[in-house]
Amino acid sequence: MSLGLCPLSKRSWHPRHGQPLMAKPVSGWLENQTASIFGKIPKAFLYAPVAVLVGALIAGTGRGELLFRSIGFFLVALWLSVDLWAWLLRKKVQAKNLRWWQSCKFAIGWACTSILLIIVAKTVLWGLSNQFEDQRKNTWLNLRLEHEPGIGTSDPMFEQFTVINAGDFDISKKHQLVCWVNLAVPNEHGGLAVSNLATSEDSKGDVHMAAPAPVLFVPSDSVVHSGGDVQTHKCLQYFEFLHTGCVDVSVIFWYALENQQDVEQTKTFRLVAVNDGNDHFTWSKQNKDDPHMFCDEYIHKREREEGIKPPS
């Protein structure tokens, strides 16, 4: 029996002569400084449950606490960035990939950090947009309209309309109260009805009318403060009816919040006043988008009785 030696193949083991399997990471000045900073961070802050806790606190603050939410999002982004950089700077690669890794790890780190910061900025802007929307909604829902007759008369053409800001935010000088007369019918022989006419008065006392062109709103010279401040106007007094039979009017309040003057809004209140025949008027609120003309019945009645001219 004879023994022979097996020839060495390409897959045979070769001695490493003291060379490590993985190349040691090369540490530069920046890496050393970063490692020094990371070393001062308590290890408890690098645990995943900390990020979960921060996220829960963010969710618990609600949309109104924008400052706390922004800080929370920044802390989460910082936590992720620190964890990423710690992994990048400590990662070991094979010797053949060492040069490539030295060139790319900073690009990867800064790219990911930049993306995280952009996400945080976009999230904060989204939260700010939601906060502004909540402010506009709060003001719109808390705008109220009240009206009372003029001194010594119950005629609705001398009615005094008051818009009350019962919300939590101030309304800027960009505001005005306008009356859009859908239909106004006099209670007199041969009287002429009025329809589709807007009337308003600016802070200088100048009267503005529009029919049927779009209303041109004119800013005021004062702010309507939150908590119950008012804007009052007798916007129907410019029609010289001896006696009024029926009025269908949309009271339009144009405004912009003090901290959002670029966002203009309107709120419309529609009211109808009908003469019961004894110069006593019954007021009712109506849907502002209802196409029905609520004074039509009164017009038909007057046409039959007095021959009143219908509106053109």
Image (cartoon, helix red, strand yellow):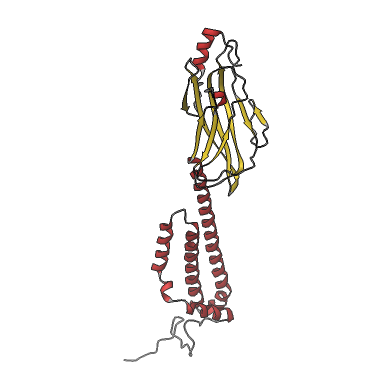
Looking at this rendering, what residue extends furthest in the front direction? 152
Identify whether 109 is placed above or below 282: below
Residue furthest to the bottom: 2
Residue at 53%, 53% (x, y): give it: 128
Please identify the residue farthest to the left as the structure is shown.
1
Residue 93 visible in the displayed image: no
Percent position of residue 96, x then y: 53, 78
Q: Residue at point 53% right, 14% down?
A: 299
In this view, the residue in front, 204 or 260, is 204
- Residue 248 visible here: yes
Residue 54: image quadrant is bottom left
Residue 45 image point, x, y percent: 43, 72
For the N terminus, which image quadrant?
bottom left
Q: Residue at x 59, y 21 (%)?
A: 195
Q: Position of residue 125 (x, y in %)?
A: 54, 55
> How many circles with numbers are drawn on the protein?
0
Relative image position of residue 90 (x, y in whole percent): 49, 78
On screen, residue 73 versus residue 99, left or right, reads left
Question: Quarter of the image containing the C terminus?
Answer: top right
Q: Please state which of residues 182 and 239 is positioned toward the viewer in this rendering.
A: 239
Q: Residue at x 60, y 20 (%)?
A: 194
